[in-house]
Image (cartoon, helix red, strand yellow):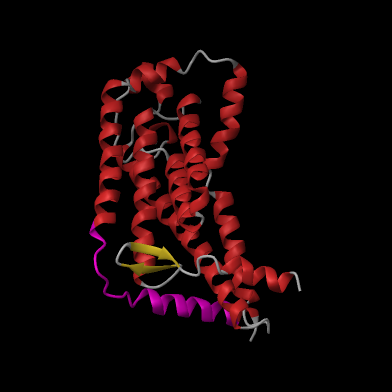
Amino acid sequence: MTTSQRLHQARRNFVARWRNPRAVHRDEALRRLDAIVVLGLAVLALVVAVQGDEAIARAMNGFPAWVYAVFGYVTRIGASGYIFAASTIILLAALLLRKRGQGATFDRACLFVAERAGFVLIVNAVSGIASQVLKHLFGRARPSLIDVVGPFHFDMFAMSSRYASMPSGHSITAFATALALSYLMPRWRWAFVFVAVMVGVSRVVISAHYPSDVLVGAVIGSLCAILLRRAFARRGIAFRHTPAGPRLRGAGKVWPALARVFNS
């Protein structure tokens, strides 16, 4: 089978599984927890917008130059390009390594890796689209225009980047990716969350966004990861559904299977 045939077959298999979601029992406790966390962030965003956006934005102008330099590097972590590139490369490599005569265990491990990379890729694609739509829908002026139009100027459907403050796209990417990766590597969850928080802070420090923009971005990014994990679990892709909620497929089995082959 040629490379193009392998990829075409993988695409057809994914589409077939996606079109046939399984009926599952609702994991009410987990849904309530997710709803509480998301609602809490949304309420916090509203409170911060009213009470702190202007004051915090104005306070970001007096730091030493090295602080802006450091956070300028941190903010680049929230760019989605490298995430798309990395997840696409891993996805394609895992698919192309299957059926190479290394055995069923290795093939299944490659499938799990491909599914996980595809999950991260789709989470970023969906959250990125949501970011662009909402930015132009709200048309909130960035902090650089605070002395011109104030902190709560909205120019709906504006196409200018100067009116694309809410939500923070970098924060959406950072939190969507952090949550997606925490589902795949739960031991590192707090490290991923810390990085996402620092990206959000960096957007405020360099005066690209108001604090509430970052919090709204965190809500949207988190929602995308939460809802897509459930959608994937219903189709048995990357995750499996259990009464306690979605669980990672092949947990603890992927890297030992790959290591045995590559070390042999």
Residue 78 showing in the rendered view: yes
Q: Is residue 38 above or below residue 3?
A: above
Q: Main secondary structure of the magenta part?
A: helix
* Lateral position of residue 55 relative to residue 253, left or right: left
Residue 130 position within the rendered picture, expressed as x and y whole percent measured from the top left: 37, 50
State which region is magenta: 5-28
Is residue 203 one of those drawn in magenta?
Answer: no
Identify which residue is drawn at 75% across, 69% down: 263
Q: Is residue 77 above or below residue 12?
A: above
* Lateral position of residue 46 relative to residue 8, left or right: left
Identify which residue is drawn at 60% across, 63% down: 90
Identify which residue is drawn at 63% across, 72% down: 257
Residue extending furthest toward the top = 62
Query: In front here: 180 or 122?
Result: 180
Identify which residue is drawn at 37% across, 53% down: 224
> To which quarter of the image does residue 200 belong?
top left
Residue 165 showing in the rendered view: no
> To which quarter of the image does residue 151 belong?
top left
Is residue 10 one of those drawn in magenta?
Answer: yes
Query: In front here: 106 or 10?
Result: 106
Residue extending furthest toward the right = 264
* Lateral position of residue 161 relative to residue 234, left or right: right
Residue 37 position within the rendered picture, expressed as x and y whole percent measured from the top left: 30, 43
Query: In front here: 3 or 39?
Result: 39
Q: Is residue 205 above or below residue 240?
A: above
- Quadrant that contains the N terminus: bottom right
Residue 94 position within the rendered picture, expressed as x and y whole percent measured from the top left: 61, 70
Number of numbered discs present? 0
Residue 245 position within the rendered picture, expressed as x and y whole percent measured from the top left: 33, 62
